Image: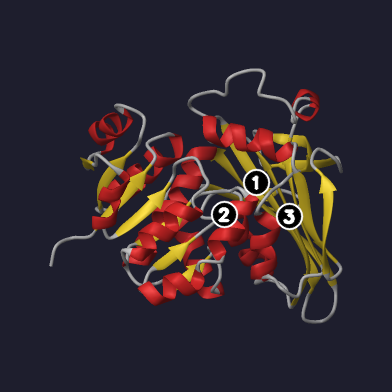
Amino acid sequence: MNDPIVGIAGAGVTGQAVGRVLRNLGIRTAWFDPQAGAAVRASRRHGGVVLDAWSDLGVVDAVVLASPGPHCGVIAELVGTGVHVVSASDEHDDVVASLGLDDHAVASGSRVVVGAALSPGLTGLLARHLAGQLDVVDEVHVAMHGTGGPACARQHHDALGGLARGWHDGEWIERPGGSGRELCWFPDPIGPADCYRAALADPVVLHRLFPHAARVSARVSATRRDRLTARLPMLAPPHPEGDRGAIRVEVRGALTGGARETLVAGAVGRTGDMAGALAALCARACLDEQVPVGVGVPGDDPDAGHLLLREVLDAGVQLHEFTGVARVPR
């Protein structure tokens, strides 16, 4: 039997992080990027073959979509060929639409993981980790700082100008992006940053993981200029290599004895590297049949989520728990 091949659609910052992790895992890769020369450069750097067209992805065993979204239409096409798919899209409407492909994936026998990025994605795994220390989970709140690359920066810009959704006491609420300032403390060296509501996919994913939580919210860090120009074209081009980023996850609930507790954890590193590590490990989980047939998100199964988080740690992502003094979880 031939060794499986994972196709990587998108040879940008996140896609190259996917390729680097898969190479270290000994998994063969095939690259596709519509930008001339991008896939060739990624192949030379990380190994693997180069594909000439989107349709060529239908012959591999699994595909990681690390290209700019939307991904829903591409997922539907790939699932029709029986390929497993991992999507790193973090756009709210795209994630919601992709979750609606479950029946299609089940009928094709495909394993699909959506929201496999930093936020959503790693935020859900951290929330699972913290929730395992509680008897009851009442609230989950996440915040993100930084962008992975040009496409991610544009999505961050658009999200601040969109409509933010959150789960509040049994119903979805909508608030304008850029509102609701909150000072959030991220792991060093990021530190404190003002964060605001935005059109993010995290609340949908986290509500799926914790349906009994009364409140779920998500915010992103932003400067005053970010907020003022969110509904205008970007004034400055994004950095081609992304920047250092971080996430912060806060879970509130009760211990077995009824005592109230608030737990906080975070991760820090190159934003694209953290997102790419999770997406790559989700692809391996699909190949190893550790993910059920159908459409899911990282952390759907608590036990599998804990294992996936450990693998993310092993891949080099720095995680921190806040207990008065930051410490690395063991």
The x, y position of residue 310, in whole percent, is 48, 61
Q: Secondary structure at mark 2?
A: helix
The x, y position of residue 37, in whole percent, is 29, 27
Quarter of the image where one finds residue 129: bottom right
Q: Amino acid at mark 3?
A: Thr
Q: Residue at x 67, y 18 (%)?
A: 235
The x, y position of residue 19, in whole percent, is 33, 44
Q: Residue at x 56, y 70 (%)?
A: 300
Residue at the spot of label 2: 122
The N terminus lies in quadrant: bottom left
- Tell me, yes or no, whether the two marked residues, 3 and 1, touch with CB atoms within 8 Å: no
Mark 3, residues whose alpha carbon is within 10 Å: few (<14), some, or many (≥20)? few
Number of dots carrying numbers? 3
Q: Earlier in the sequence, mark 3 or mark 1?
A: 1
Mark 2, residues whose alpha carbon is within 10 Å: few (<14), some, or many (≥20)? many
Residue at the spot of label 1: 247
Q: Secondary structure at mark 3?
A: loop
- Tell me, yes or no, whether the two marked residues, 1 and 2, touch with CB atoms within 8 Å: yes
Mark 1, residues whose alpha carbon is within 10 Å: few (<14), some, or many (≥20)? many
Q: Amino acid at mark 1?
A: Ile
Above or below residue 154? Residue 2 is: below
Q: Secondary structure at mark 1?
A: strand
Question: Which of the two marks, 3 or 1, is nearer to us in this view?
Answer: 1
Residue 147 shows in the view: no
Which coloring applies here? Answer: secondary structure
The x, y position of residue 207, in whole percent, is 70, 66
Residue at the spot of label 3: 323
Q: Earlier in the sequence, mark 1 or mark 2?
A: 2
The C terminus lies in quadrant: bottom right
Above or below residue 150? Residue 67 is: below
Q: CA distance from mark 3 to mark 2?
A: 20 Å
Q: CA distance from mark 1 to mark 2?
A: 8 Å
